[in-house]
Image: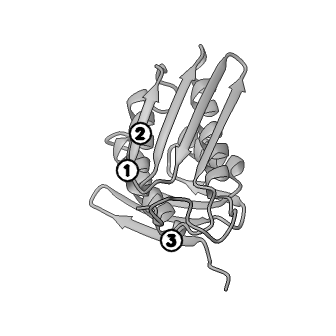
Amino acid sequence: MIVKRKAIVRRKTREVDVTVLIDFDKSGAKISTGIPFFDHMLKSFAKYSGIRLEIEAKGDLDVDEHHTIEDVAIAMGSAIKRALGDKRGISRFGDAMVPMDDAIAICAIDLSGRGYFNFDGKIENSGIKFENFVHFFDTLSKNAWMTVYLSVKGFNAHHMMEASFKAFGIAFGKAIRLMDREVRSLKGVLD
């Protein structure tokens, strides 16, 4: 029996209306959040993870970018969690080191069932605020129930953020790769 590793999540609040479709066994991206730089980063994640990602978000950008970025992370994390199902057969772990000109990002992921984000680095505001960059990954990690370690160094803020999303994408693609029929845990479950 082939299990579809796909999910659609809609999150609607007074501040944001976001729909996320994620499919681990197809590729491509269609992203529209109203924040062009954020769209670019999410497309980069989809490309380097090798998954299909569609996001349509309409938020209160007249206030600022925070609510839109946060709600995209919540919906995307929930979609990842649903698409993973019982995680049977996935590699579980993934890592990547991505240089981009002056910047370098290192990412490691464990699809452990425990949401935790550890970040090491400092980035000046670029296409999105640094605090929202970190908040995105933290919120995503908690809602997807995955442990993510991300470290970045460099000079150019755009390069640092983009290298981070690429490293995250590559590591995520490795972690969701199908290996066998077993759950890769001595406990027998990943939750």
* Residue at 66 percent of width and 37 percent of height: 96
Pick the residue in front: 100 or 33: 100
Going by the numbered disc 2, the residue's amino acid type is Phe
Q: Mark 2 or mark 3: which comes first in sequence?
A: 3
Residue 117 is tagged as 2
Dots 1 and 2: beta carbons under 8 Å?
yes
Judging from the image, what secondary structure is the residue with disc 2 in? strand
Q: Residues within 10 Å of mark 3 (few under 14, many from 20)?
A: some
**Left-right relation of 24 to 141:** right
**Pick the front one: 15 or 131:** 131
- Please tell me how crowded label 1 is: few (under 14), some (14-19), or many (20+) other residues with Cα within 10 Å: many
Which percent across, then down, holds residue 44?
Answer: 66, 44
Q: Are marks 1 and 3 in contact (CB under 8 Å)?
A: no
Can residue 7 be seen at all in this image of the molecule?
yes
Q: Please determine whether, in this image, residue 115 is positioned above or below residue 98.
A: below
- Label 2, label 3: how many angstroms apart (C-alpha)? 21 Å
On the question of residue 19 being in view, the answer is no
Question: Which is nearer the eye, 33 or 191?
Answer: 191
Numbered badge on residue 85:
3
